[in-house]
Amino acid sequence: MQSPIGIFDSGIGGLTVANAIRKVLPHENLIYFGDTAHMPYGDKSAEAIKYYSLKIGKFLQAQGCKAIVIACNTASSLGFSDLKEFLGDKIPILNVIDPVVEFCAQQKHYKKIGVIATKATIKSDIYAKKIKIAMPNVTVQSLATPLLAPMIEEGFFENNISKTIINAYLSSAKIKNIDSLILACTHYPLIRKEIGEYYNNSVEILNTAEIVADDVKRQLTNLNLLNTVTEKPKYQFYVSDKTSSFETSTQLFFEDKISLTQKNIWSE
């Protein structure tokens, strides 16, 4: 029960999920891995994403993690099945897609759901497929927004640059007249406010990080894996590459200043 929860993403966007997990599970130890050397995953091949996911999953397992959360929509859509098959009987593998689909299925007022994500996630069509199974009468409208994750990763949001890019994407006819919007990339909660302003709060913007964190709590509770020790938890953060300004930008995602350890797992 005291073993850490492992969390990984293509970069630091998954820290929005880690931060949400910390809030609902304040006693849990966390180990985070951001694959910044290969970020963004959205323009990588499916085979590459599967490989990265397997390597990171093996690394987190070696750290003694009791569960692994794939805090990346692209890796969840393309790498989840392989990682679950590889490690599933040894350790629970959780993704960020299924909890959001389950949440949508409970919202009977949704009629037209929009999805914005990386190219790879949109190409997989995983949200549309899963939502149509859960909600046959709902229309799903999807749009690839490849500039958003790199923009956020570099700290360009809540300014004229981000507003211009966000408005250009959201004005697309592909997501016209939606009543709700799934931010299908773990970077995107950081621009949730700007997206809400574009829609003048007429569209429900799902807080996907919170939805995923609540699901992690539910699943660990069901598996009897919650940490019952109330001493101060330990957090460890790894990245596959970092720059001098990178560590500072993590505070935007995790709310606190954190120390990043560079770790090359690819030659191991």
Image (cartoon, rainbow, N blue to C red):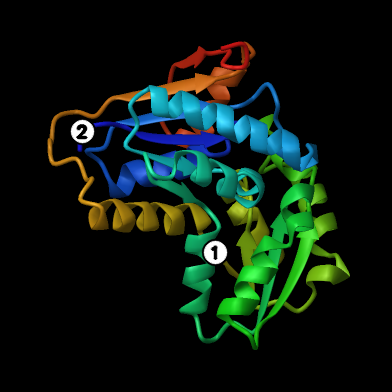
As helix, strand or loop, the secondary structure at mark 1 comes to loop
- Horizontal side of 215 relative to 77 (left or right) equals left
| Residue behind mark 1 | 206
In the image, what residue occupies the spot 62% across and 11% down?
A: 267
Q: Find residue 44 and report its image quarter.
A: top right
Image x and y of residue 185, in percent? 63, 49
Query: Real-space Cα distance between discs 1 and 2?
Result: 31 Å
In the image, what residue occupies the spot 47% across and 24% down?
A: 59
Q: Is 29 above or below relative to 93?
A: above
Q: Quadrant of the N terminus?
A: top left
In this orientation, which residue lies closer to the viewer: 227 or 11?
Answer: 227
* Mark 1 vs mark 2: in front: 2
The crowd level at tag 2 (other Cα within 10 Å; few <14, some 14-19, many 20+) is: some
* Upstream in sequence: badge 1 or badge 2: 2
As helix, strand or loop, the secondary structure at mark 2 comes to loop
| Residue behind mark 2 | 2
**Amino acid on which the number 1 mark rests in the picture:** Leu
Q: Is 28 above or below relative to 245?
A: below
In the image, what residue occupies the spot 12% across and 36% down?
A: 229
Q: Is 261 above or below relative to 57?
A: above
**Amino acid on which the number 2 mark rests in the picture:** Gln
Q: Find residue 154 and report its image quarter.
A: top right
Q: Is residue 186 visible?
A: no
- Horizontal side of 188 relative to 251 (left or right) equals right
